[in-house]
Image (cartoon, helix red, strand yellow):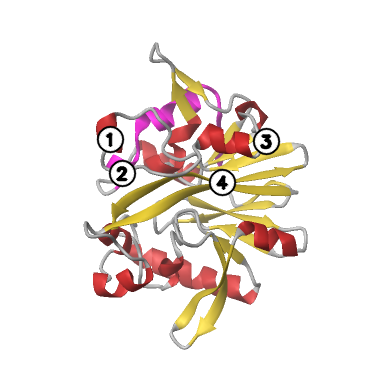
Amino acid sequence: MKISSFNIQTFLIDGGTMFGVVPKALWNRQYPADENNLIPLDLRSLVIETDNRVALIDTGFGDKQSEKFFRHFYLFGGEGLVEGLANLGYKPSDITDVIHTHLHYDHCGGGIGVDKSGNYYPVFPNAKYHISQAQWDSALNPNIREADSFMMDNILPIKELGLLNLIKKEGEVMPGVELRFFNGHTKGQIIPIIELPNGKKLVYTADLFPSTAHIHLAWNASYDVEPLVSIEEKEAFLNEAIGQNYYLYYQHDHFTECSTLSQTPKGIRAGNKLTLNEILKGA
């Protein structure tokens, strides 16, 4: 198995939305904001090559949306989606599987492109796009909290172009890559768990743990549709993860790519902060 990482895009977002009811005086110590209360988030993706398949986890914003849309995100940094893959030695046609953790616009926008005539096309023409059944149903019939996060030009063409593979139960999607479902942030969010060559596991945390700061059980984004469910899911998974020495890979944390977990007097927190390359060297 070969595992590679790259950052599609870095952007700024209101810090308060990322920490919900937690006072800024607390979260700002761990994840500092600028003078406009904005914090930087990354859109990291993993590429997993195994068993003659090449999987890509999440595809970022894409570039279909208007200048007005992107004006709210203050984009900076990052390699880009196709460019980042090229830097790793991959072409879009090499990708056989796209795993969308969920269908919020910052996670799935790059999988579908639009040409000059306004026609949609698959950015990864040889790939199946894996999405949980629960998330697909939720995106097509969104609640009022999430409606603006689901953009139909990112979603409907996946089915119309014959790319869609709906995941109805947890389990392996390819050798060494297990998909688990979580429902606090959004219904049917997929969390991929990758088995490393040494038998340890790497967890692509998506929006279950957007950053190391969100390991704190009560620190949850205001975007979570079921915050109490998020707390329950986080507690159960953290106990599993620390018991089995999982590594966590953070999709959004601008400052930390990966970490171990550590038991402290205040609960489970991030332990050693590492890069993916440092983890893989030990694997």
Residue drawn at x 36%, y 66% as measured from the top left: 31
Sequence-earlier tag: 3 or 2: 2
Write the start and end of the magenta stretch as one range.
146-167
Residue drawn at x 29%, y 29% as measured from the top left: 66
Sequence-earlier tag: 3 or 1: 1
Q: Amino acid at mark 4?
A: Phe
Q: Identify the residue under disc 1.
A: 69
Residue 278 placement (x, y as % from top left): 66, 62
Category of crowding for the residue at label 1, using alpha-carbon neighbours closer than 10 angstroms: few (below 14), some (14–19), many (at least 20): few
Q: Is residue 152 visible?
A: yes
Say which quarter of the image contains residue 219. Answer: bottom left
Between marks 2 and 1, how big is the CA–CA gap? 8 Å
Residue nearer the viewer, 41 or 131: 41
Residue 170 placement (x, y as % from top left): 60, 52
Q: Identify the residue under disc 2.
A: 73
- Residue 162 is inside the magenta segment: yes
